[in-house]
Image (tube, rainbow, N blue to C red):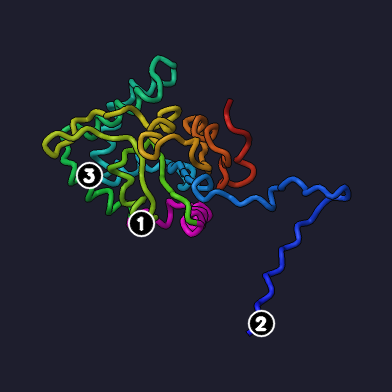
Amino acid sequence: MPPQSPAPTPMIPSTADGQTPAPTLDTLAVDADAAQVLSVFDFDGTLTRHDSFVPFLRFAFGKQRFNRQILRLALPSLEYLARRMDRDQLKAQLIRTFLTGVEATWVQQQAEAFCRRSWSRLMRPNGLQAVADELRSGARVTLCSASPALVLQPFATRLGVQLIGTELEVVDGVLTGHITGGNCRCQNKVLRLESVYGPLSQYRVRAWGDTRGDHELLAAAQDPHWRHFHPSWRRGQPPR
């Protein structure tokens, strides 16, 4: 049997002077680990048409009880408007007013009912499509929100994504009315993400946000999206 001829050596293109050209982006293989995408979505106002936490409280406690409780926030709200109280302090006061001494399981049940009841009118269809697209692409996808994680968990579950949110202190199954770990906004969003996923430098971060509380998150992303799902006339520029 005659010996087989050796396989032909593949031709490598060369320049006019006979030198092999430098590799280009088209010829370089992409490292799969380096290409890992982390897609981070703010929730309120980004994936939703408006804030969800106050409507949740109204739904959970009923109109009459909600109205009685919200009156207790009149003075703190005036102090906030006068800049004698910051947003985080007002948020903490809201949580203390409504959720001190409330059973965590009751809040979970109310959150599940609120998700079912409000989904179609609360969620932005183009935002839902974007989340689905990111999941299909193989990205790691998470919500990162200042709203309590206890309230948003049913939404994250329905979306099929992970959740990072403001954590509420629970003792013996009862909410104390206190936040643990700080309000999940501004730089705290980046810190919370890194506590879960490790250094963000190892990912290609894609992020979606719509308020000043998302500025640091967007600044940490290679692909930032500001008010991406809003009508064009409402988008404007991210705050500086």
Q: Which of marks 3 and 1 is nearer the N terminus?
A: 3
Residue neighbourhood size for the residue with mark 1, other residues' Cα within 10 Å, grouped as few (<14), some (14–19), many (≥20): few
Q: Position of residue 94 (x, y in %)?
A: 30, 30
Residue sitting at x 59%, y 32%? 238
Residue sitting at x 52%, y 51%? 32
Mark carried by residue 107: 3
Q: Position of residue 3 (x, y in %)?
A: 65, 78
Q: In this view, does 233 lie to the left or right of 183?
A: right
Task: Tell me how many marks there are.
Answer: 3
Of residues 235 and 36, which is closer to you in this image? 36
Of residues 32 and 196, which is closer to you in this image? 32
User: Eyeballing the image, is 123 above or below 224?
Assistant: below
The residue stretch that appears in magenta: 116-137
Mark carried by residue 158: 1
Q: Do the residues labelled 2 and 1 touch (CB within 8 Å)?
A: no
User: Eyeballing the image, is 239 above or below 43?
Assistant: above
Task: Tell me the distance, in whole angstroms, between the alpha carbons under discs 3 and 1.
Answer: 17 Å
From this viewpoint, which residue is outermost toward the top? Answer: 84
Residue type for callout 1 = Arg
Of residues 164 and 13, which is closer to you in this image? 13
Q: In this view, does 192 lie to the left or right of 98?
A: right
